[in-house]
């Protein structure tokens, strides 16, 4: 992905001041007793208008599945001239086979299988693939062309949804990778009271509480999106937050 500022300016056009207005814009503040993953607190909104690229990829995916094309969508016939995708059926077949392989597995095995299968896809930047700084791909686009971090996360999200996972148990999270000082995207899958990280940089599925170098910026599902901030740091002997 592009640098963090560029990622936020293209994906989240709302100014920070608007985010801070809270309930007036439909935000729902979580309680301090219910922190989010990666040591953050979160604010929820059911209005997906700001996450246009996410809505667009969901629309294109639905069109791919039904064989229809929504007005204004970049549909397969336009996205892939024959010279760019001479075997158009191949990504769809590979996707169907992956979903079929996932469905009979237990949830933890599904997480491991989808990570192993999709992490084998080539990493290709959006600039090299599409000539733009940031483009969110459907699974068919991703399997045909390779993709960058959010494309891995999107494909894992949709594969698990097809395998029976509920939308409320899955989120694509855009984070700051503090080790590399870059924006990054991962999938967060919640199961049995634990949040698991599916990351194209790691073939192991790791519990979120064991990952300390990701600072979440926002996360999104089909029904809502969340703005994240660091959780208050509290002194060992009291409740007062430490200065940051």
Image (cartoon, grey):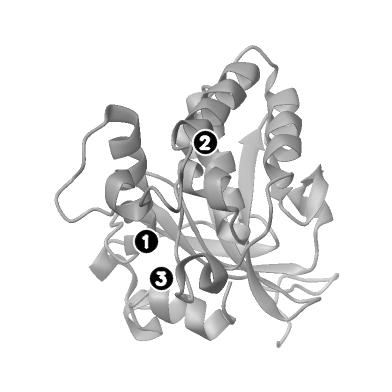
Q: Report the residue that reaches farthest toward the bottom.
A: 243
Q: Say whether residue 240 is left or right of residue 10.
A: right
What whole-number distance in Å separates the C-alpha atoms at marks 1 and 3?
Answer: 7 Å
Q: Position of residue 49 (x, y in %)?
A: 26, 62
In front of the other: label 2 or label 3? 2
Look at the numbered disc 3 and give the secondary structure of its residue.
helix
Q: What is the crowding at mark 1: few (fewer than 14 residues within 10 Å), some, or many (at least 20)?
A: some
Residue at x 46%, y 42% (from the top left corner): 86
Evaluate if marks 2 and 1 touch, with contact meaning CB atoms under 8 Å apart: no
Look at the numbered disc 1 and give the secondary structure of its residue.
helix
Evaluate if marks 1 and 3 touch, with contact meaning CB atoms under 8 Å apart: yes
Res 53 label: 1
Classify 187 as above or below 133.
above
The number of numbered discs placed on residues in the rendered structure image is: 3
Earlier in the chain: of badge 2 and badge 1, it is: 1
Classify 158 as above or below 73.
above
Classify 224 as above or below 242.
above
Residue at x 54%, y 33% (from the top left corner): 159
Residue at x 68%, y 34% (from the top left corner): 114
- Determine the image quadrant of residue 143: top right
What whole-number distance in Å separates the C-alpha atoms at marks 2 and 3?
Answer: 26 Å
Can the viewer see residue 139 in this picture?
Answer: yes
Residue corresponding to mark 2: 91
Residue corresponding to mark 3: 11
In front of the other: label 2 or label 1? 2
Q: Say whether residue 122 is left or right of residue 164.
A: right
């Amino acid at each position: 992905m592009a640098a963090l500022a560029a990622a936020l300016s293209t994906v989240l056009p709302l100014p920070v001041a608007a985010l801070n207005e809270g309930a007036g814009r439909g935000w729902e503040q979580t309680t301090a007793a219910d922190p989010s993953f990666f040591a953050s607190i979160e604010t929820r909104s059911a209005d997906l208008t700001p996450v246009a690229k996410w809505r667009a990829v969901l629309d294109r995916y639905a069109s791919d599945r039904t064989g229809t094309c929504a007005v204004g969508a970049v549909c397969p016939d336009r996205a892939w001239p024959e010279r760019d995708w001479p075997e158009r059926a191949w990504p769809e077949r590979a996707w169907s086979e992956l979903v079929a392989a996932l469905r009979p597995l237990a949830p933890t095995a599904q997480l491991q299988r989808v990570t192993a299968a999709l992490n084998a896809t080539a990493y290709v930047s959006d600039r090299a693939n599409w000539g733009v700084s940031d483009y969110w791909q459907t699974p068919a686009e991703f399997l045909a062309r390779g993709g960058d971090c959010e494309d891995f996360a999107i494909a894992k999200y949709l594969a698990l949804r097809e395998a029976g996972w509920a939308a409320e148990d899955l989120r694509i999270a855009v984070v700051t990778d503090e080790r590399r000082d870059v924006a990054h995207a991962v999938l967060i899958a919640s199961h049995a009271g634990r949040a698991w990280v599916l990351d194209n940089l790691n073939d192991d599925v790791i519990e979120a509480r064991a990952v300390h170098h990701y600072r979440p910026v926002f996360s999104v599902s089909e029904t809502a999106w969340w703005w994240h901030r660091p959780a208050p740091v509290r002194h060992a002997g009291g409740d007062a937050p430490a200065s940051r």
